[in-house]
């Protein structure tokens, strides 16, 4: 079969499948997501998607990178929406492959609405959200009986780029607080927790969670900025912040605690 005959099938109705690819490790996509890729005529994929996943799509399929570099209008949501619909109308099945889960700061519902405005069938295949899985891979439960009975998942910034007002309420709570898209606001978030008298609250920072180039910084509110610098956490990959007592349950935090206890005893 030629690529042209593969793509041009007049009997195929336009349809779109939104697929969550998980936190980064390509093995963490769902089996249903892989099945969708196998029938794709076109795959539109984001910057946070491991390109090894594209091997599950037919070799003849069109693969289009629609990453989201900050400020680049070529990858704006409006452009991606139009590409998604145009490819579906011209070739049939389009897979929109996105990192994490589609509905956790993934703008998946906007894409569903846009497809519906053109009467194009669209289905959703959820992905594993980094907000829960990335801490879990470090042995950090986001809830634990007797420690934390609730979870807040927040963005670090609002639509204008300012510190999210909801973080003030989060800092007052006893919940585990997971902050996505907020590493550049770390000093400000630390100040909020310090103002609440929570300078010794455990904190974890995880960059490129689940991936080979993962970096982890573990500490407390009062020291986490310095620890992050020491561990060379930067903005070249997705960074997730975890504030809460459940961080203390991780093996890394316990090892750090034992180290400082030994250091104090030896003085």
Image (cartoon, rainbow, N blue to C red):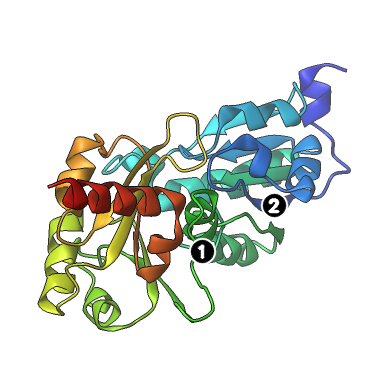
- Where is residue 199? Give x, y as percent: 16, 68
Dot 2 corresponds to which residue? 16
- Where is residue 130? Give x, y as percent: 50, 54
Give the total number of marks visible in the rendering.
Answer: 2
Quick check: 110 above or below 262?
below
- Regarding residue 210, the answer to whether it shows in the image is yes
Quadrant assignment for the N terminus: top right
Question: Is residue 37 rendered to the left or right of residue 208?
Answer: right
- Mark 1 or 2: in front is 1
Residue situated in front as seen by the camera: 218 or 121: 218
Residue situated in front as seen by the camera: 42 or 13: 42
Quick check: 117 above or below 106?
below
Dot 1 corresponds to which residue? 141
* Label 2 CA crowd tier, 10 Å (few <14, some 14–19, many 20+): many
- Quadrant hosting residue 257: bottom left
Please tell me which residue is depicted at 65% across the width and 32% down the height of the picture.
53
Question: Is residue 263 rendered to the left or right of residue 58?
Answer: left
Find numbered disc 1 in the image and state the secondary structure of the residue it sits on: loop
* Label 1 CA crowd tier, 10 Å (few <14, some 14–19, many 20+): many
First in sequence: mark 1 vs mark 2: 2
Find numbered disc 2 in the image and state the secondary structure of the residue it sits on: strand
Question: Is residue 60 rendered to the left or right of residue 239?
Answer: right
Please tell me which residue is depicted at 57% across the width and 67% down the height of the picture.
113
């Amino acid at each position: 079969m030629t690529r042209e005959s593969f793509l041009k099938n007049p009997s195929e109705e336009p349809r779109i499948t939104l697929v969550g690819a998980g936190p980064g490790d390509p093995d963490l996509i769902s089996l249903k997501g892989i099945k969708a890729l196998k029938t794709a005529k076109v795959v539109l994929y984001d910057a946070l998607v491991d390109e090894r996943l594209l091997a599950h799509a037919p070799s003849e399929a069109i693969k289009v990178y629609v990453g989201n570099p900050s400020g680049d209008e070529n990858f704006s949501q409006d452009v991606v929406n139009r590409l998604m619909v145009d490819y579906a109308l011209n070739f049939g099945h389009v897979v929109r492959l996105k990192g994490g889960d589609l509905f956790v700061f993934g703008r998946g519902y906007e894409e569903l609405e846009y497809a519906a405005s053109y009467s194009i069938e669209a289905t959703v295949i959820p992905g594993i959200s980094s907000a829960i899985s990335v801490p879990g891979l470090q042995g950090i439960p986001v809830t634990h009986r007797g420690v934390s009975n609730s979870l807040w998942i927040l963005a670090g910034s609002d639509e204008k780029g300012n510190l999210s007002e909801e973080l003030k309420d989060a800092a007052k709570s006893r919940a585990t607080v997971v902050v996505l898209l907020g590493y550049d606001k770390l000093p400000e978030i630390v100040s909020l927790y310090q103002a609440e008298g929570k300078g010794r609250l455990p904190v974890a920072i995880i960059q490129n969670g689940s991936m080979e180039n993962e970096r982890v910084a573990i500490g407390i509110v009062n020291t986490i900025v310095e620890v992050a610098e020491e561990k060379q956490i930067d903005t070249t990959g997705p960074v997730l912040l975890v504030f809460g007592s459940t961080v203390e349950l991780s093996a890394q935090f316990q090892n750090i605690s034992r180290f400082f206890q030994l250091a104090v005893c030896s003085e």
